[in-house]
Amino acid sequence: MANIGFIGLGNMGGPMAANLVAAGHRVVGFDLVAENCAAAAKAGVSVAASGPQAVSEAEIVVTMLPAGRHVLSVWNEVLGAARPGTLFVDCSTIDVESALEAHRIAAAAGMASLDAPVSGGVGGAQGATLTFMCGGADDAFARAKPALGAMGKKIVHCGAAGAGQSAKICNNMILGISMIGVCEAFVLAEKLGLSHQALYDVASTSSGQCWSLTTYCPVPGPVPTSPANRDYVPGFAAALMLKDLKLSQDAATASGAATPLGAHAAELYEAFEAAGFGGTDFSGIIAFLRERARA
Ligand code: NAD
C-alpha cells in the first residue's frame, strides 16, 4: 500500500481519495475549501495544511483540479516539496498543451508523471468504477495502476505524455455530437407523430444505436435511469460538456484537424449555457432544440 498525496478534494476528488483510503492506502489530502477537507477527513483522509505538506511524504501524488491553469499552478507549487522520483498523476480534464507542460515541469524536477483523466462522473468516482485514460511512460503507468485500480475498473494506457487527455476530449466530442443527434431525432419524431418508445425500440437495435440513446436517453420513459426521468438533474452537467467540447476545439485548431460537427456542438452547448442551463444535465439540451424548432 502506498503513501498518496491528493490535491483537489471536490465532487470527484473527494470520493476518489475516500476509495484510496478504503483500499488501504495512506492518503494525505489538501483542498482550498475547508468543507471539502472536512468531508475527506470523515472518510479517513489525513488533511494537510498546504499542498506542499500533502506531498512531502508521498510516493504518488494525485491532482483532481478544475482546469489546466490550476494543475500547473499546483504542480509548480508542490514539485519542490516532493521526494525525488515521486510519481505525479493528474486526473483532471485539461487541455493537451497544459498536460504536456505538466509532464515537462515534473521531469525537470526529477519526478515521474502521468496524465490520467477519467470518465464515469461523480457516480463512478463514488462507486470506484471510473475509466482512466492514461498518457505517459510505461513505468509511470505500471506504478500508477494499483492506485488507479482502487478508484476505477478500467485503466487504459493510451500512449505517451498527453495521450490520456487526447483520448478524453476525442471521446467527449463524440458524446456531445451524438447526444445532439439523438435529441434531434426525438424532436423530429415528435413532429412526425412517432412515439418516443417506437423510435427507441427501433433505433436502440438498429444502426442509430449509441450510448446517448441506450444509456442516457434524453426523453423520459425508455431508459428509466437516465436524467430525463428526474428533470435533467445531472448526471453530467452541460457546463462540463461545454468545457470538454471547447478543449476538443482548441486541440483541433492547434493540430489542424477538421471537426465541423464538434465545432457546431460546442456552439449549441454555449448557447444552452448562455440561456442559463449550465447546471442542467447535458441531455436537457433536447428542450432547447425543441424551442429552436418552434422559433
Ligand atoms: P470540483 O470543482 O468539485 O473540484 C475541484 C476542487 O479543486 C475544488 O474542491 C477546489 O477547491 C479544488 N482546488 C482548486 N484549486 C486548488 C488549489 N490550488 N489547491 C487545492 N485545491 C484546489 O470539480 P470536479 O467535479 O471534482 O472536477 C474535477 C476535474 O474532473 C475537472 O477537471 C473536471 O472536468 C473533471 N471531471 C469531472 C466530472 C464530473 O462529473 N464532475 C467527470 C469527469 C471529469
Image: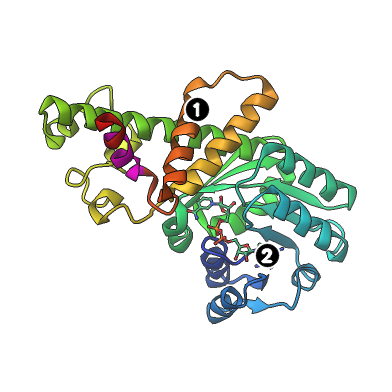
Q: Is the residue 202 above or below the residue 108 in the image?
A: above
Residue 241 in picture, x, y percent from top left: 48, 43
Tell me, yes or no, whether the highlighted magenta stretch contains residue 285.
Answer: yes
Residue in front for this viewpoint, 249 or 210: 249
Look at mark 1 in the image and give the residue it sits on.
Answer: 262
Q: Quadrant of the N terminus?
A: bottom right
At numbered mark 2, what does the secondary structure look like: helix, strand or loop? Answer: strand
Residue located 16% across and 31% down the image? 190
Q: Amino acid at mark 2?
A: Ile
Q: Which residues are the magenta region? A: 283-290
**Of helix, strand and loop, which mostly describes the magenta segment?**
helix
Badge 1 crowding class, 10 Å Cα cut-off, few under 14, some 14 to 19, many 20 or more, is: many
Decide if ligand 1 comes within 8 Å of the CB at mark 2.
yes
Q: Amino acid at mark 1?
A: Gly
Look at mark 2 in the image and give the residue it sits on.
Answer: 7
Residue 135 in picture, x, y percent from top left: 67, 40
- Relative to 198, is 151 on the left or the right? right
Residue located 58% across and 33% down the image? 248
- Relative to 49, is 240 on the left or the right? left
Residue in front for this viewpoint, 69 or 278: 278
Residue in front for this viewpoint, 44 or 50: 50
Residue 237 in picture, x, y percent from top left: 43, 51
The answer to whether one can see residue 202 in this image is: no
**View quadrant of ligand 1:** bottom right
Count of numbered labels shown in the rendering: 2
At numbered mark 1, what does the secondary structure look like: helix, strand or loop? Answer: helix
Residue located 60% across and 67% down the image? 9
Residue in front for this viewpoint, 32 or 96: 32
Tell me, yes or no, whether the highlighted magenta stretch contains residue 106.
Answer: no
Q: Mark 1 vs mark 2: give the one in front.
A: 1
